[in-house]
Image: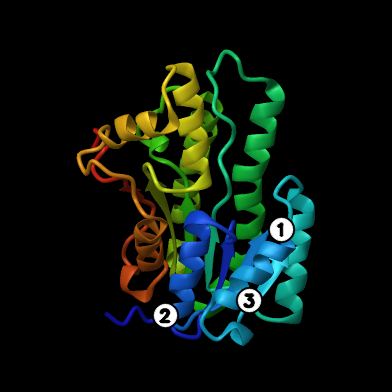
Amino acid sequence: MNLGIQNKNALVCGSTAGIGKATAILLAEEGVNVTLLARNEEKLKSVLASLPNPEKHSYLVADFSNPTELKELVQNFIAKNHGFHIVINNTGGPRSGTLLDATLAQFEDTFTMHLKCNHVLSQATIPFMKTQCFGRIVNVISTSVKEPIPGLGVSNTIRGAVGNWSKTLADEVAAFGITVNNVLPGFTETERLNEIIKVKATKENKTFDEMAEIMKHYTPAKRFAKPEETANAIVFLASEKSSYINGINVPVDGGRTKSL
């Protein structure tokens, strides 16, 4: 299928590992001009070198703890280079833990990294999308938007807020040919999943491998997803072919989420 996004410009956040990296590679393979965004410059350089035709692509070094600086960085890039037709909002999840044990600082930091940064990136990039009558914003969130996950109190809370922010934004920009959708990964083979497995294994006095095997059986697919499998859904939602799909949550979880 021709996805109709060759020579479009995409900003991919959290693109040095896991789902973000897999998404950047798939977009580049589709002929998209990719700008990677993450905080580790050495890792960014490594991923850039691995993309097809690396000279077509670029990277930005940014820390999601400072939304104001992030917005200025992206605005300056746009002013000097080009705007973005596609934005993939993606950043690492907060630490595991129960809701009652969470500190106010954990809520504030997570709200900043996940909601505030998504918001300022949208403010920086949507004006160009409007001039093109084409825009795709895909937020990588979590299945906790549909079903809260035990032991992820702060994450559950903020992910829900991002889901509602996204749905509201989708309604506001739809008339300009811009869509805003969410991909909700289930258990995916990433550093984040490894962290969750370690915490659960320690709590239940099991080895890492024992806990991983138990968690695989939480899902009907009886396995964890590859990052590329989640990236496939992201890239489709970023494409021309998804033009009438807007404001939705797409679980990519092997059937684990029980809600419709």
Foreground of the two, 243 or 221: 221
Write down the quadrant of residue 226 in the picture: bottom left
> Which amino acid type is shown beneath numbered disc 1?
Asn
Tell me the residue at 51%/24% (across/down): 153
Q: Which mark is residue 40?
A: 1
Residue tagged 2: 30
Write down the quadrant of residue 30 in the picture: bottom left
**Which sits earlier in the primary sequence, circle 2 or circle 1?**
2
Foreground of the two, 221 or 149: 221
Q: Determine contact: label 1, label 3, CB under 8 Å.
A: no
Q: Position of residue 245 (x, y in %)?
A: 32, 61
> Which amino acid type is shown beneath numbered disc 2?
Glu
**Which sits earlier in the primary sequence, circle 1 or circle 3?**
1
Q: Is residue 114 visible?
A: yes
Q: CA distance from mark 3 to mark 2?
A: 18 Å
Residue tagged 3: 83
Does 241 sit left or right of 164 as displayed?
left
- Does residue 130 lie above or below 229 as drawn? below
Q: From the viewer's perspective, is the residue at label 3 or at label 2 nearer?
A: 2
